[in-house]
Amino acid sequence: MIVVTLTARMQRHLYIKTGIISIAGIFLLFLPQIIPGSNYFLQILTTCFLYATLALSWNLLAYSGKISLGHAAFFGVGAYGSSLVALNFDINPLLSIWCGGCFAAILACTGGFLFSRLKGAYFALTTLALVEIPKMIIENWETLTRGSLGLLNIPPLRIASTIAQSYLPTYFINLGVLMLVFLFLTLIFSSRWGWAINALRQDEKVSFSLGINATFYHVTTMTVSGFIAGVCGAIYAHSVGIIEPSMVFSIHYSALPMVMSLFGGRSTIVGPIVGAFILFSIDQLAFQAILPIGHQILYGLAIMVTILYMPDGIMGLANREHLWHYSRQKK
Amino acid sequence: MNVAIYVKLVISGLALGSFYAIIALGFSMIFGVTRVFNLAHGELLLIAGYSAYAAWKTWGINFWLTIPIAILVLLAVGIVLYKVLSSIDEPLELNTIVFTFGLALFFQNLMLILFSANYRILSSPQWTKTLQVFGATITSGSLTLLTTSLLAVLILYFIFRHTFWGKILRATIQDREAARLLGINVNNTVILAFLSGMALVGLAGPFFASFHYIYPAGGMEATLIAIIITIVAGVGHVRAIIWAGWGIGIVENLVTGILGAAYREGITAIILIMILLYKPYALSNSQ
């Protein structure tokens, strides 16, 4: 039995990081009381929380060494799963979003099991193709999903004491889910499981020889990642109210988490959150105004610039010390 | 359904397949010499298609004249792209696949800005004439597509197999270091092959715009098909590529004819996943 212990320095670093994030979280929790007037600003933050969570789920998979180009599959399955459960069984959306996550987790688990022996670019290709399969099923199962017409009147998320038509419930739920996922991942990365997937990323063969069961860890990582992405999709569906297959399965939702993680810095745990906040703010505040259609060109540019000039992202520029080390060996 | 419909589906499948073969040849040449998994391949095809469309729309020129324009545009894009791609760090396969995914997104939005999301088609009156083969009606369009693609593939096959440059190219694809040891100027060969790949896409673009409705997000399927064919056929195997292209074209047409168009993309994706699961390291080492 290997017992993983953190060095004192890592432990201190972890405490400081968690502390800062918790303070930021509490601040954000009371932000709507401080600035009640600025609706638009809070709406942007609401979406930032959602995308940050999505980016964290992508980054979890990247932490185990697998690049996904198909998180839209989990996002879309989560959105449809949750909406269908809420519409057909009249369940409170607060509960049904977790059902959506479970549907996505089932897909992710199956995919993870089937694709576990694929590496690098080949895994990325399969995930890219994976998006089309649930999309095809949903588009053609018209009695259940109304096909490409999409679902209407999806019940919005509500918390007991807030007004129904406000964006505030979504604000708090998104913030809550983000904090939950962040704390969960912080705990996980310093656990035995986290060290195992870290080892798998750095060198799969050496990890085998240390007795790490690669298939088990890949499947569980992918399942957790799919679950989180599915919950994000479900929240999205309930906050928008209308979904259709080409919308929730669009390449956009595969690209966003990847761009945000890479740009923020996939080698740190805060990176994806920072990336989501910076990129989405730039998108909404600057690009949206200049280019009403095609403003997502920003995300394409961000991927290219990141790969070419700063492989460790913004956080990598900020502190080179605390990076998780990505092995840079050839094959 | 009677036999005539199947004959029609198979023949238009052959036409579609030869067209796919050209796209896949372009992909395979670019991949073969640079080891770049170009996920923006379909978007490059769309750029060629859109530039042909723009030329046709603004100057009202003949369909055949749009082909050199599309090729020139893609060569210009290719030179820039080659410069950028050659500066990407290790691990190459993973970084380029992420990079070209970003590039695909960039191109999609660029085309969205320039041409809006409307469906466009470069309509050419000569394609609608029909003729009868075994009781099935074939449009002259699919016949033109078939002959042009076959001609292009034959010329390439000749270049690959029977000229000195083809030999150099195959050597470079198989083993770059060994080719360099034999005194081949690898850099020039790589650039030339990359640009030939781009020119092939440029050739395919106007046909794409003329037989399909093009729209900015419509490139990903072509990319997936090019990848499928390249994996099945192997890099730089011209004959195998045309067989694989025909196979995919016929399967797609039969699926569309029997199940309906809604299943086409999904089936393409399933084929890709099956092939990757069956041949997981198909392209990882030199052929």
Image (cartoon, grey):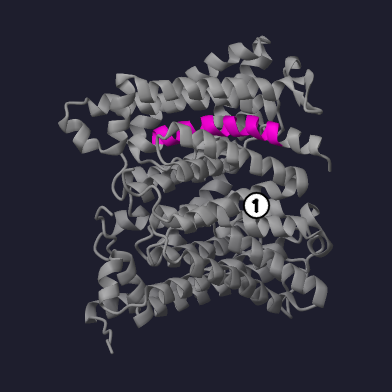
Residue drawn where x is 56% and y is 53% of the image = A129
Q: Which of A80 and B170 is in front in this view?
A: B170
Residue A322 vs A90, above or below: the answer is above
Regarding residue A115, the answer to whether it shows in the image is yes
In front of the other: A240 or A106: A106
Q: Toward which corner of the image does residue B9 lie, by quadrant?
A: top right
Q: Position of residue A224 (x, y in %)?
A: 51, 73
For the C terminus of chain A, give its image quadrant.
bottom left
Q: Compared to B46, does B104 lie above or below? A: below
On the image, the x and y values in percent for residue A48 come to: 55, 60
How many numbered marks, from 0 up? 1
Magenta region includes residue B104: no
Q: How crowded is mark 1: few (under 14 residues within 10 Å), some or many (20 or more)?
A: many
Residue B283, above or below B141: below
**Which residue was labeled with disc 1?**
B266
* Residue A208 falls left or right of residue A37: left
Asked if residue B11 lies in the magenta stretch, the reply is yes
- In the picture provided, is A311 more to the left or to the right than B24? left
Taking the spot 27% from the left edge, 86% from the top edge, the residue there is A2
Stretch of the chain drawn in magenta: B10-30
Q: Is mark 1 on a helix, strand or loop?
A: helix
Q: Position of residue B277 (x, y in %)?
A: 48, 59
Q: Can residue B105 be seen in this view?
A: no
Q: Is the magenta stretch mostly helix, strand or loop?
A: helix
Q: Which chain letter matches label 1?
A: B
Q: In this view, does B124 lie above or below A296?
A: above
- In the foreground, B130 or A7: B130
Residue at the spot x=62%, y=15% of the render?
B55
